[in-house]
Amino acid sequence: MDPSSASEITRPFSSAEALRFGWRTTLANLTPLITLGAIGAVLAALGRALASPGNGALVIPFLGPGIQVLQIALALAFIRVSLALHDGRPVDLDRPAELLDGLLSYLVTSVLYGIVVTAGFILLIVPGVIWAVQFGVACFVAADAKLDPIEALRESSRLTRGVRWHLLGFGLLLSLVNLVGALAFGVGLFVTVPTTFLAAVYAFRRLQARSTSMALHRHHPDEPAALAAG
């Protein structure tokens, strides 16, 4: 394998290019992305209101968990929209059934991911960081390939193997971008959240391309590994 291919295996995408893609795509598709962002802002506000002492959560005990389920459903729709925009497919928010297909499996995947990461942080923090990165694209896998939760976690572990330090740095960078958006009176999040979502989808597709290229190289070791950038 030539040195450039080896480098692409350990760094399958550029964080800067991922963010540039997210920024350009967000500006070109503001209407659907801001619509989803507005729904998310409303759900977040309702969740904060219910979490305040003496509010409706005491009267309607299932309302809080119901809002959390809606937030997870919105995350699934956001990933599906981001995947469509990355792949050049049309986006239609008027067909929510298509965006939310496989919601139960995605919901379980999301919950399992949260449990695994939380357990890791309880175990002296470091395992939590490791597992957060190792299984970090499980929800993308569940949304994209509609795998069952355990298979989605396994696929995430496989896709992230060998690039987890790079992904950790990338995740911290995305968090920093959203922090800047939050500091702009929260309004900036309407741009930074879709930008970072799309950047994450860009990275996810590059991880899939890397995996395909490595599989081809294993079957044809005499041919140079062509790690596609998309």
Image (cartoon, rainbow, N blue to C red):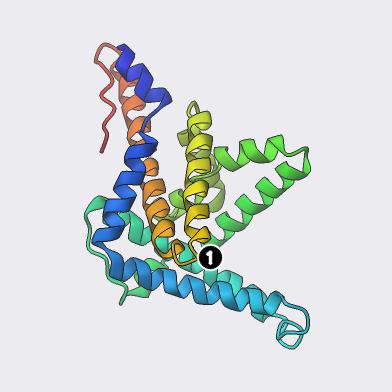
Nearer the observer, 68 or 18: 18
Q: Where is residue 141 shown, x and y percent of the image?
A: 44, 49
Residue drawn at the location 53% of the way across and 53% of the way down: 179
Q: Is residue 133 rendered to the left or right of residue 212?
A: right
Reading the image, the residue beneath label 1 is: 72
Residue 205 visible, this angle: no
Q: Is residue 131 above or below residue 105?
A: above
Disc 1 crowd, CA 10 A, few/some/many (<14, 14-19, 20+): some
Residue drawn at the location 68% of the way across and 79% of the way down: 50
Q: Is residue 28 rendered to the left or right of residue 172?
A: left
Residue drawn at the location 56% of the way across and 37% of the way down: 134
Quadrant including the N terminus:
top left
Q: Is residue 212 above or below residue 118?
A: above
Query: Residue 33 is drawn in which quadrant?
Result: bottom left
**Residue flagged by tag 1: what amino acid is it?**
Ile
Q: Is residue 83 rendered to the left or right of residue 175?
A: left
Nearer the observer, 191 or 158: 191
Query: Residue 67 is drawn in which quadrant?
Result: bottom right
Q: Where is residue 9 shown, x and y percent of the image?
A: 39, 24
Q: Is residue 15 rendered to the left or right of residue 92?
A: right
Q: Where is residue 22 shown, x and y percent of the image?
A: 33, 50
Query: Residue 193 is drawn in which quadrant?
Result: bottom left
Q: Where is residue 153 shown, x and y percent of the image?
A: 55, 44
Q: Secondary structure at mark 1?
A: helix
Q: Is residue 97 above or below residue 87?
A: below
Quadrant including the C terminus:
top left
Residue 164 visible, this angle: yes
